Image (tube, helix red, strand yellow):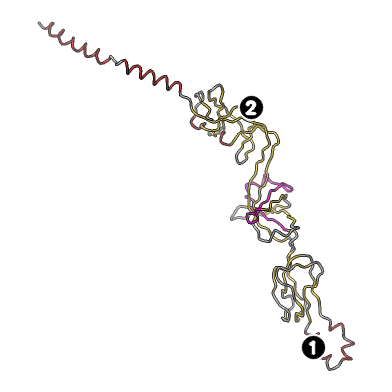
Amino acid sequence: MKIRVILFIAAPMLFLSCKGKSQNPGEIGARVHAKEQASEFKVPVQVTTARRGAIQEKITIYGKLAPKQETLLSSQFPGRILDLSLSEGDRVAKGQVVAVIQSPKAEALQMAASNNPAQTQTRVEELLPISIRAPFSGIVTNKFHFSGDVVAASEPILKIQQDAVFYLWGQLPAVYLPDIRIGQKLNIAFPDLPQVFVHGKIDAINSTVDRKTQTVQIRTLLLNPKHLLKSGLFAKIEIILKSLEQATLVPRNAVLSGEAASFVFLKQKGIARLQPVRIGLKSNNMFAVQSGLTPGDSVIVLGNYELKDGMAVEVMH
């Protein structure tokens, strides 16, 4: 009697167990189809071709124009300005008389001459006013007095600036000092004068680094034959640190950097292949590859951040 009860209970349990393992044929087909789709999925990417070309590694710094030469014109003795017709902005030539000064003694002699003309004849040289001449050609930038003013000895009358040539002083971060040298080429633009673009070279490198900014001044000489440049004008200075005429080039976004190395993904027969590379010169948007690539390699430039070695890829157009 006990045996029959056990058999009777075990049979339904066996039935339920078998029923739990059975699956609907439609469910099985859906899973197989999903698995096939997963195995056929291809990561959409964009590719480019590694090529040979020239590359320059540059930095951009900023600077300001300063006059190569300027001077304050004054009289060596006190006196009255008899003639000063120049104004700020007027041009002067080297040797041109810019002001005429008469000394107090000459004024006193002139007053005496009206009463004693004979005495005046014997002291004519002392009556002559002194002419102040421009030491170089340039432009009047400041005027401190006018005709008729009385000035003390060495008191400034005019300020003249040579504007046919300027110094451009640039502020170079000290970290780049090992990369620059006298004679290095510069490309120079002026934000306020977009039509002006000139080339120059480094003429001098200051020996003192500013403690606060950790920059050092570099200097270049700029000719200004059309007088378009002005003192105090800001400039954008592009320094070419290094250059290569023939290098294997890839876009910057093709290169991925790890902790100890750089690499790219190559597209080979529809598969992404991880390729370690050694990077050389860098420009704003291109890298020179020293090893790991050859010109003509198909390099993935978009979608590479999601890739793993061996994944199937499909080129987007």
Taking the spot 73% from the left edge, 81% from the top edge, the residue there is 148
Q: CA distance from mark 2 to mark 1?
A: 93 Å
- SS for dot 2: loop
Quick check: 315 above or below 235?
above
| Residue type at tag 1 | Ala
Please count the marks in the image: 2
Label 2 belongs to which residue?
296
Residue 193: mark? none
Image-quadrant location for residue 168: bottom right
- Is 85 a magenta residue? no
Q: Is residue 125 left or right of residue 247?
A: right
Coordinates of residue 59 in the picture (x, y in percent): 63, 46
- Which region shows up in magenta? 166-194
Coordinates of residue 163 in the picture (x, y in percent): 73, 62
> How packed is label 2: few (under 14 Cα within 10 Å), some, or many (20 or more)?
few
Label 1 belongs to which residue?
108
- On the rendered image, what quadrant is the C terminus found in? top right
Taking the spot 44% from the left edge, 21% from the top edge, the residue there is 39
Coordinates of residue 221 in the picture (x, y in percent): 73, 55
Furthest residue toward left: 1
Furthest residue toward bottom: 115
Quick check: 257 above or below 42?
below
- Is 188 a magenta residue? yes
Taking the spot 36% from the left edge, 19% from the top edge, the residue there is 31
Coordinates of residue 169 in the picture (x, y in percent): 68, 55
| Residue type at tag 2 | Gly
Q: Nearer the viewer, residue 271 or 154?
A: 271
Tags 2 and 1 in contact by the CB under 8 Å rule? no
